[in-house]
Amino acid sequence: MAAGGGSSSLQLPCVFSPKSRQYLALCAQDGRLRIWNTDSKTLHQEYVPSAHLSATCICITWGPCRTVKEGPQRKKRKSEAGQVEEKADLLAMGTAAGTVLIYSTAKGSLHCTLDGGHSGAVNCVQWHPEDSILYSGSDDTNIVEWDLQTGKTRSKWKADRAAVTSLSVSPDGKLLLSAGQVIKMWDLDTKEVYRKFTGHSTAVTTLCFATTRPPDSNGLYFLSGAAHDRLLSVWQVREDGKDKNSVVSFTLTDEPQHIDLVTSNRKEEVRALRMAVVCKDGQLHLFEHFLNGPCKKPMSPSCTVQMSDTKDSPVPIPLLAAGLGADTRSILLAYGNHLQPVMEKVEINTSERHICLTRDVHTSLSLSIETAVSKVKTPIVNTNSRVLVPGLPGHQAPVKGISQGSEKRKKDTDTKEMSIAERIGEIDLSSVSKGKGAPKGTISLQTDNFAVLLVQGLESSDANILNKVFQTRKEMVIKKTVARLPLPAVLPLVEEQSFISSSSVDLYFYLQLIHLCTQQLPDLVTQLGVLYHMIESRVKMFHKLTKLHGKLYLLMTQVGVLLHRNNHTSSSTELLTTMHCCGSF
């Protein structure tokens, strides 16, 4: 089972489906949910949330396997009546907007939306192992218990003074682990704190039960990992309450990002634990340990797996997730990037301490991509010829021959076409009238004009035209303009730097252009994903910089007044006293 804890803003969720591990669900930089089939190594389903740009997905958790009715099925025989196949179906996604999306892989669509429970971003979601119940933790410091049959909240309580970053439900469904400033264990029947655990100095990002709850309550273990922490701690829940410190620590090379563990089914008190941990640096660490009380020394991995390409100067390939197989040597790996991961089942010799697997990622990707045959034929045009097509610049279409005599030119008509400068001079983008109340004689600017001006400004490299158009703030006009842009002009507009640096440019217009690129040009999503994060970080810093600018402006104004007074009164004492007050401000 994967650790279903919270995740930081830079960590993208990625998790295998339970039991059979037939599917791999992940969210990439573009905010889309992609479900890959690990058997065929192809994209099984893709879902684009309506607010995938403004409310990105933070965490993903698969629900328990259940019987799924995918459509009309044949009547089963008597020998097959008792054989009920359970599949992984429902998938819970926590978003930055405070909602929880339930996606059904059997239907291939959104099952329901759980909203109204949180006022902050949802950092973690966890399913109840038996009942149709879901738990979610948020930045608003609350835990919400959802009823999936009604889509409403069953219970809500404050978990901590800080944000709830991780959750985990015990295998018997009676206990719940939550992590904020401290780790708390809740009794789900009474919603009261059963135990508290302290030991991490940073936010806990991973919580996971390692064993089932025994009758004597002394053999219950769980794991925890924190941000910027290279240790994975194991805690023992004792009946006498002497469980304030972790009993075992596993050493890692970086913060744990994905955990999969398997416990033995033996009935003895000592339980063997097999664990695969994928760290943030892209390495895989394998552990095998018997949970039998405290261990003084930190445990090192029995085997460390790295991946690299086959170039002359090898480049590391990051591992995204790992799933342990039934035997001790078989491991299912997902590596590469989140937009198009590579899935492979490998045999690992755990007797070796360090293993490096070399793979040609480009070859692997080409095997899993189905090439789409285009039915559109582009006419062959000589390099010396020039085709002029009516409509928006940038659109290319075959020109049909016009029969002689079908259309006659009017000799007496004198058509004068306005230049670009004259057109911009007459159009006032800030005072475009709209509706029935618009005064007569004013020109209503249409979205076609915006698209034409953008392309013409790009072809003529005129920053004035681009800045004029990008100053509009009307959301509907922006969406229609971006939709009418010819495809060859979208990427040059996104890469154009002359208007990006301008403070008057509407950021929403620029984001709509990037969104169009991700829809029409899937091969650019990898490059533009980094741009998403850069814009998001700059927008977050803009509010703080504005406050700092205001404080500096007031400070410099006060200093200027004092210097002016000092020239007349020569009172240095007053100057130093007032500057000290300004500095404390």
Image (cartoon, rainbow, N blue to C red):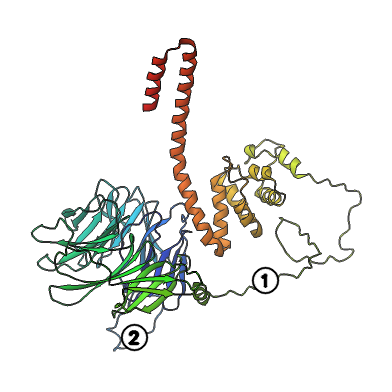
Q: Amino acid at mark 2?
A: Lys
Count how many numbered circles sit on residues in the image.
Answer: 2
| Residue name at image x 71 percent, y 70 percent | 378
Residue 247 shows which numbered tag? none
Residue at 51%, 54% in the rendered image: 531
Q: Relative to 215, does residue 428 appear above or below in the rendering?
A: above
For label 2, the crowd category at 10 Å Cα-Cα, with few meaning under 14, some 14 to 19 and many 20 or more, is: few
Which residue position holds label 1?
A: 376
Judging from the image, what secondary structure is the residue with disc 1 in?
loop
Position of residue 273 relative to residue 83, above or below, is above
Do we see residue 106 in this rendering?
no
Q: Earlier in the sequence, mark 1 or mark 2?
A: 2
Identify the residue under disc 2.
76
Q: Nearer the viewer, residue 174 or 208?
A: 208
Image position of 325 (left or right of 215): right
Q: Residue at x 19, y 56 (%)?
A: 186
Residue positioned most to the left: 240
Q: CA distance from mark 1 to mark 2?
A: 46 Å
Classify 47 as above or below 332: above
Q: Mark 1: which amino acid?
A: Val
Residue 41 in view here: yes
Nearer to the camera, 301 or 105? 301
**Image location (x, y in percent) of residue 533:** 47, 53
Q: From the image, which quarter does the C terminus lie in?
A: top left
Foreground label between 1 and 2: 1
Residue 473 in percent (x, y) is at 57, 42
